[in-house]
Image (tube, grey):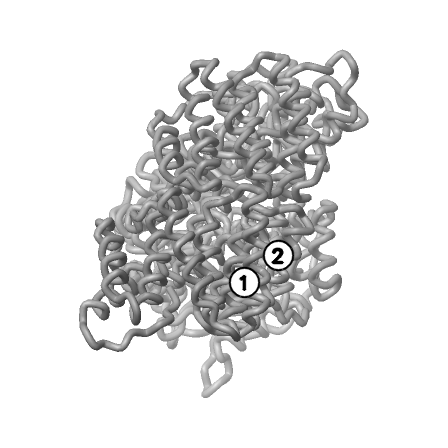
Amino acid sequence: MARSHMRWIPPHDGTACLSFGPFKLFPAERLLTRDGAAVPLGGRALDVLLVLSARAGSVVEKEELIAAAWPGVVVTEGSLRFQIALLRKALGDGVDGARYISNVMGRGYSFVADLSPQGNPLAPDERIAAHRLDESLPGQMTALYGRSQDIAAISQRLAASRFLTIVGAGGVGKTSVAIKVGHDSRARLGSAIAFVDFAALSDPALVPTAVAAALHLSVRSADPLPSLLAWLRDKRLLLILDNCEHVIDAAAGLASGIAQATVDVQILATSREPLNVQGEQIFRLEPLATPPEAPDLTAETILSYPATRLFVERAGASGATLDVSDTDAPVVADICRKLDGLALAIELAARRVASYGLRQTADLLNERLMLAWRGQRDALPRHQTLRATLDWSYDLLDDQEKLVLCQLPVFVGDFTLAAARQVVPAGSLSEEDVVDTLACLAEKSLLAVHLTGSLIQYRLLESTRDYLLSKSDQQIEGLARRHAAYVLRHLEDLPVSPAANGTRASADIANVRAALEWSFGPQGDVDLAVALAATATPVLLATSLLIECRRWAERALAVLDSARHGMRAEMQLFAALGLSLMFTRGNTDDVRVALAKSLELAQALGDAPSQVQLLGALQIFDERVGNFKASLCEAERSMTVATHSADPATIATANAIMGLCHHLVGDQIKARALLEAALAAPAQPKRLSTIYIGFDHRNRASIALARTLWLRGHANLALQTAQRTVEDASKLDHPVTLCIALIWAVSVYVWVGDLARAEADIDRFIACAQAHSLGPYLAVGRGVKGELAIRKGVHLEQGIEAIRNCLAELHESRYELLTTGFCLALAEGLGAAGKIGEALELVDHTIAEVKANGDLYFLPELLRVKARALRHAERDDAAQAQACLVESLALSQRQGALSWTLRAATDLARMWASTRRQEARDLLAATLARFEAGFETADLIAASALLQQLDENGTELTLDHNT
């Protein structure tokens, strides 16, 4: 029976070195050198040489040589002859007359060269150089993506501390990074770099032996550690200890001992958990960065991330033809996000592209099939499949760690310590067990840990979650009820407003979805499902997940039985349904029905805050469908309810609603007072209502105030307010609120003449609307792009066509809030294109609509634009044009809209310049005198230039000027 070959070292009377010819033989180190360079020699050939040299000049029997080189193994003489032939070739026996080994026929062999014993061992640096320790350092066949900063940081910290452990999940790339650090250290350390891979060790007791072997040191005792430490004491080298996690105690003891016993030995370890010994520095290697989940990212942007670059490079290396377009790039990004930026998982998936194609590979990732996908044949066994990598980590856990870990897949995405404490404990597990075990699992890199605001969050990597689900699906099903009940309690405790919970709610969404799916599923609970949907839909509204909000509201209302009719949950569900329908399907009658039903329930429950918010929602609905008179009625009702409630926050909401209405119906003086009162009320940190209806009234009041300030003649203050409101909306993580702020801020930028800023913000508005399926807003965005083209005087026809299409879409979806402004811009574009008849017809129609519907704030500007069209008509009707301007001037003054007043006064002064020059000058001068700032804006620049011309007698005036 064959047994493993154990190296045998024959006695040499303590001689450290035997010299013969150009060779030196070091028996203790089992090293043969020629002129200082190591001679590559197999182990059995070296055994034969050691026996022959120990008995130099004597005949050594064949049986003795076989016993030394093949202990316990039966071999023929042919094997010995083969090793003798290899040995003679390595020594150059017979070349240029050199003779080292003689064959004695029928007996054996004899070493015949002169041997010169040397008592002093090799100097330490000679010994290391002779062996070239860095030959143990694996080569790097491929580039490392996204690791340059990590490698630089590790090298810097290692130089400062001498002992550092790279910690990270299996497959994250710890070994590759450590090897690169080793290669980068050659310039500093030469070949004094030893790499020790503990992966193949099954016995922790062999850890010191493995290190000694990597250093080419012989092991002569049962405990080699003292000798190893003594040998290393005066050495200068880098020792890389790879894959320490399964021999963690032995590796930790060895590393600690070396760090304390030496001054110039650097230790770089890799492990899935820290060694936790004195002097150790920890560097946690994070997964590769992946592109964000954002719309309209180009292929160039997506492929700038290291995870996607690695995927594309490995797919190409595996034979796939992958020319990544802007269409395909998001698929690559999704794959890399699904794999959490884990280098090994990305490589395994990339290898499948050649066989399955890119999109099919992406689809297969959702079926837990990739756990068995194989990698390269020469990879370490634990890296040949993702399942093997995870098996390696899982098998190192104790029973309690396995028990807790197998229950964590009930969470989807992030979860908190509080969540785990409430959901996981069962049977013999206590909350304390869960707390302690989570810390252990995080240390062992089986849980990702990150900070969200001030809250610590945990997360299973997606591949780890799939692996655990494949082991414990049934166990997870049993936890689902506790998980859903926890999610319900958690949502009930959340302050329901974007400002208070934006990031927090977003982080919880994955668990909310999972709880809802189970609750409405075949094993679920209808009562729990309805309660959960009623509590979750405000969060879905707050995070602008409108399609999901509508879906869950509809499902919950469909299973609502008579016992739950008239309850608060029903009120919440109808409110959520109405608002989600408004933003995703437009302003249909279903929206009003749902909101009215919710309001009726709020009234029956005596819930004043909810009544005011629902009246605000109905007010918004009315203004969106173009019924501004009805909108004002809803606002007045909200003020009545708020006043009776005597609640400051509810009154502030009603002030915001009323202020916005007065702005739109053309009373800017009242609007400013009400909006400023709404904003003067302190922000409320706690839940103010049993529902959250998807609007931030404080933000809407602020952006309406920006427009009101411009109309009141405070351009600079209007710009500052608009910009600040957009910034505040951005912080809320609430896309609907951000879109409202952006689109109204754009109107301020257009009014002051800052078209570049308007262009930038409308592009941002469109991107946000696309990302969150805000249908009508996309038409608005295209319409504003058309208006900007007209204002710039470029691509006039394209601008006109864009606004026409926009208006058609908005009319189709009954979204009339902004159509007056678009009609005004279209009339100006038609006038500029010489289509005066169409312009006049459109203006007259729009004026009639405005008077009927009540959005009168644009009426002074419509009259002014009509006057301009009349002056450019085939038959210049100066009298009617003047009448329009006089009416515009009077109306703007009644509205308190100083900026409209300036525009009307400028046009009227220009018309009077040739016949009533002094009146023109006085009118314009008096109007300009009312402004205190904003003289760098377009309207004030034009008016000031005209006034200067009027002051200069004899100057020929420009009779028409675009403001």
Q: Is residue 751 above or below residue 82?
A: above
Q: What type is the residue that disc 2 sits on?
A: Leu
Q: As drawn, which residue projects farthest toward the left?
A: 952
Work out whether residue 204 can be spotted. no
Q: Quadrant of residue 468?
A: top right
Q: Which mark is residue 406?
A: none
10 Å crowding of disc 1: few (<14), some (14-19), many (20+): many
Q: Earlier in the sequence, mark 2 or mark 1?
A: 2
**Local secondary structure at mark 1:** helix
The one nearer the camera, 46 or 489, is: 489
Give me the residue at 56% from left, 72% from top: 835
Q: Is residue 105 above or below residue 272?
A: below
Q: Position of residue 519 (x, y in %)?
A: 72, 25
Work out whether residue 544 can be spotted. yes
**Local secondary structure at mark 2:** helix
Please tell me how many numbered marks the rendered image carries: 2
Q: What type is the residue that disc 1 sits on?
A: Leu
- Which residue is tagged 2? 807
Q: Position of residue 251 (x, y in %)?
A: 44, 40
Q: Is residue 391 above or below residue 908?
A: above
Distance from disc 2 to disc 1, alpha carbons, whole Å, reads 10 Å
Left or right of 910 on screen, residue 548: right
Give me the residue at 58% from left, 62% from top: 803
Left or right of 518 on screen, residue 206: left
Q: Position of residue 846 (x, y in %)?
A: 57, 54
Q: Is residue 526 above or below residue 358?
A: above
Left or right of 875 on screen, residue 400: right
The one nearer the camera, 667 or 349, is: 667
In the image, which is nearer the foreground, mark 2 or mark 1? 1
- Which residue is tagged 1? 826
The one nearer the camera, 328 or 168, is: 328
Q: Position of residue 102 (x, y in %)?
A: 53, 75
